[in-house]
Amino acid sequence: MKRQSIDGSGLLGLYDRVTGIFNEIFDARLLTLALAALEGYCCLFTQRKFPMRWMVFVLFGMVLLMFVTLTARIPGRKPTRFRRSMAVLWFALHGMMVVSGLFFEDWLSESVPLLICYPIVFSVLCSREDDDTLRCVLRGALLGTMPFLIMTWIRKPLTWGYPGYRGIFYDANTLSMCCIVAATSAFLLAYAGIRDGRKTAGLISLLCGVGAAVTLVFTMSRSGLLAFGGVAVILTGAILAGTVRRPGRAMALLFVLVAALAVLGWRFTKEKIYEAAVEDYELAVYNHETYGNPITVPKPEERELSMDDLTSDRWGIWQTVLHHLTWNGHPSSIVQEWVAKDGAGDRRFNAHNAFLGVAYNNGWIAGLLLVAYTVLSFVLSLRYYWKRRRQSAFAATPLAFCTVFILVGMFESVYAPFSLIGCSFLLVQAPLWRADGEEAA
């Protein structure tokens, strides 16, 4: 006798009728507010640099976002088929993070929302119209970050000089992350507004983007400038290649922009290195005059550049991380081996690299899986943009935030559910998860 399978169409129909009622109330505007709240929470987390145990509250926030996005599902839509490669890498990566959490429990509060909550959000956002969803993501990111920039401008006037303007944030690098997300979202919204004929909205977004970009320059954050310069170059090049018939002059202008950013970055690097050399030499002179210690530090003008100078000690941290990788990670994100080797004392440093950070925290297997997932995500975002470049003003959104994540992730540990850069990167994954041939209506 043939065994009868369970028919889920009735349950799906009931689900659609229930969510259809809520869909009349919870529209894209509420989804925008929910995403703005999530991005704002992540920005607050970055700004205050909360302790790791607070990450458990991110789980609650993700559950709330999950319920809000469920109400925003389009009734009657067939379940979306996921791209197997993305799903397999995702669950392998975060499954490994859960395994690490079984050894070091602090990682459980980070891995659970990544393993469970985000995929549910992906499944719901995949069932929505892409333009509508990506518009909500961009507006949510801008609404979530701009209040922090406005408070920064009001409470801490812009100042120029080493070690960089930080406003109300923990340091200049965390402020730069807020600026990058705000500027990227604003410029994409400005492009979409101008292209779709909504000039007023486009102008407002453009002004927000300019304000965030100017603030980014004042932070003197080289990782921030590299990331924003990279996304500007890639997006501008992609848009010109896909929409302009004769992009020669525009590409020449783009080359000038890249050269200007390179000069600016080199100037910031030299200034930071010189200021650090002055501080080291003055401390050595003080110790010599006070305690009679010999001066072993070269004068600032005689100091030779090293990889640690160019990377602000990151080179030494990365080498230490690579030499102390384990399969199941470490109990803390602090690279204790480097702290002991460098004699940093009370200074605590993480890996300052998203990929090495995951490898150190959760094991080298998780690090390799994150690299594989990120590479696939970037390739799919390029493909997604190229297929939709003429139909959608928001087609470049996944490409933009994938680029931002990669470039910032090279110098900062930003892959976590509470990370502003990480959250922005994860929210644009939904359309990339959709299997080939499955298009949102």
Image (cartoon, rainbow, N blue to C red):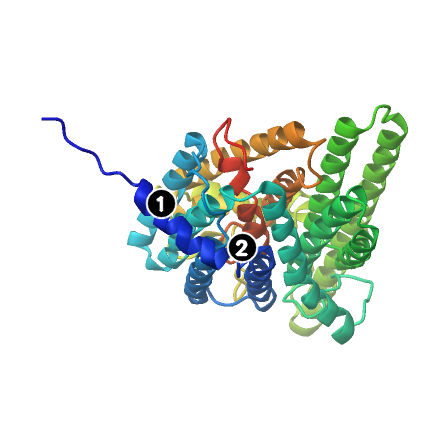
Evaluate if marks 1 and 2 touch, with contact meaning CB atoms under 8 Å apart: no
Residue 46: x percent and y percent?
58, 62
> Depth check: 12 or 317 in front?
12
Give the distance between the C-alpha atoms of the residues marked 1 and 2, in whole angstroms. 59 Å
Q: Nearer the viewer, mark 1 or mark 2?
A: 1
> Depth check: 430 or 114 in front?
430
Q: Is residue 299 visible?
A: no
Residue pictured at 75% horizontal, 59% vertical? 219
| 367 relative position to 148: left or right | left
Q: Which residue is mark 1?
A: 12
Residue pictured at 61% horizontal, 32% vertical? 384
Q: Is residue 142 visible?
A: yes
- Quadrant containing the N terminus is top left
**Could you tell which of marks 1 and 2 lies nearer the N-terminus?**
1
Q: Is residue 50 above or below residue 206?
A: below
Q: Give amino acid for label 1.
A: Leu
| 252 relative position to 29: left or right | right
Q: Which residue is mark 2?
A: 342
Secondary element at tag 1: helix
Residue pictured at 35% horizontal, 41% vertical? 327
Q: Is residue 323 above or below residue 174?
A: above
Residue 338: x percent and y percent?
50, 52
> Depth check: 262 or 86 in front?
86
